[in-house]
Image (cartoon, rainbow, N blue to C red):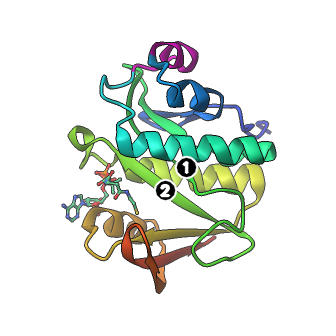
């Protein structure tokens, strides 16, 4: 039997690699992009992280500093396998329990693919791989996704993977969001 993937491992899919960002969060937050590229072994777009993602990375870096055991739930870079260029990032909002439904056993997914790379099935491949990883490595059986009602690609993606619409909430940053749940 194959040993399970560990947290520090890259997750490989048919076309992509998910490279853990935990060890490079500080470098990116400090603007040390070249060092981060070297450490990750990945080419980053010249403009990334932009303001929005810099805030996101800083938030996750603070979260990791406060809860070092949460390494497994830090984001991954989505990398095109052959070229080793970043085409997005994805991961979980945090450890089990950190999700819009306050379900103690569920994890919530987040994902972003760069505009130029959308519409090729990459996000579907990524989310499917993350679900399998969390199930295999951590025994997670419930997955949450919060999606704006206008976000057609993301709605199509989760429905395709078997998530069902279970509620809605108001997010101060993102407005109204539909709550989706996948139960394995
Ligand atoms: C949501 C997002 C990650 C999708 O990335 P992607 O790699 O283009 O997604 P996929 O190619 O796997 O496509 C997912 C589905 O959306 C559908 N889709 C793509 N663009 C669409 C559009 N404009 N309208 C309706 N459906 C669309 C695709 O057809 C596909 O469904 P199908 O396989 O049944 O045809 C990407 O749009 C993104 O990064 N958006 C900004 C960040 C974001 O919204 N993240 C999700 C937060 S909940």
Residue 125 visible from this viewpoint: yes
Image position, residue 31 (x, y; %): 47, 23
Dot 1, how many residues are within 10 Å of its Cα: few (below 14), some (14-19), or many (20+)?
A: many
Answer left or right for 112 relative to 163: left
Residue on which the image places disc 2:
110
What is the magenta range? 34-43
Residue lying at the far bottom of the rendered structure: 167
Dot 2, how many residues are within 10 Å of its Cα: few (below 14), some (14-19), or many (20+)?
A: some
- Mark 2 lies on a secondary structure that is strand
Asked if the residue under mark 1 is in contact with the one under mark 2, i.e. CB atoms within 8 Å, the reply is yes
Image position, residue 73 (x, y; %): 67, 49
Placement of the C terminus among the 4 image quadrants:
bottom right
Image position, residue 120 (x, y; %): 27, 45
Q: Quadrant of ligand 1?
A: bottom left
Distance between the Cα atoms at labels 2 and 1?
5 Å
Residue on which the image places disc 1:
91
Image position, residue 163 (x, y; %): 48, 73
């Amino acid at each position: 039997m194959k040993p399970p993937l560990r947290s520090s491992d890259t997750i490989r899919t048919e076309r992509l690699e998910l490279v853990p960002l935990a060890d490079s969060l500080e470098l990116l937050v400090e603007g040390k992009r070249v060092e981060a590229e070297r450490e990750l072994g990945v080419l980053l777009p010249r403009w990334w992280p932009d303001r929005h993602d810099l805030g996101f990375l800083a938030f996750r870096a603070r979260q990791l500093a406060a809860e070092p055991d949460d390494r497994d739930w830090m984001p991954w870079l989505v990398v095109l396998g052959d070229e080793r260029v970043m085409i997005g990032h994805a991961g979980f909002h945090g450890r089990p329990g950190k999700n819009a439904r306050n379900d103690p056993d569920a994890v919530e997914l987040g994902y972003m693919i760069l505009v130029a790379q959308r519409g090729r099935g990459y996000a579907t491949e990524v989310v499917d791989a993350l679900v399998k990883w969390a199930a295999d490595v951590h025994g997670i059986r419930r997955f949450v996704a919060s999606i704006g009602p206008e976000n057609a690609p993301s709605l199509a993606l989760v429905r395709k993977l078997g998530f069902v619409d279970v509620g809605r909430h108001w997010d101060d940053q993102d407005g109204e969001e539909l709550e989706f749940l996948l139960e394995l």
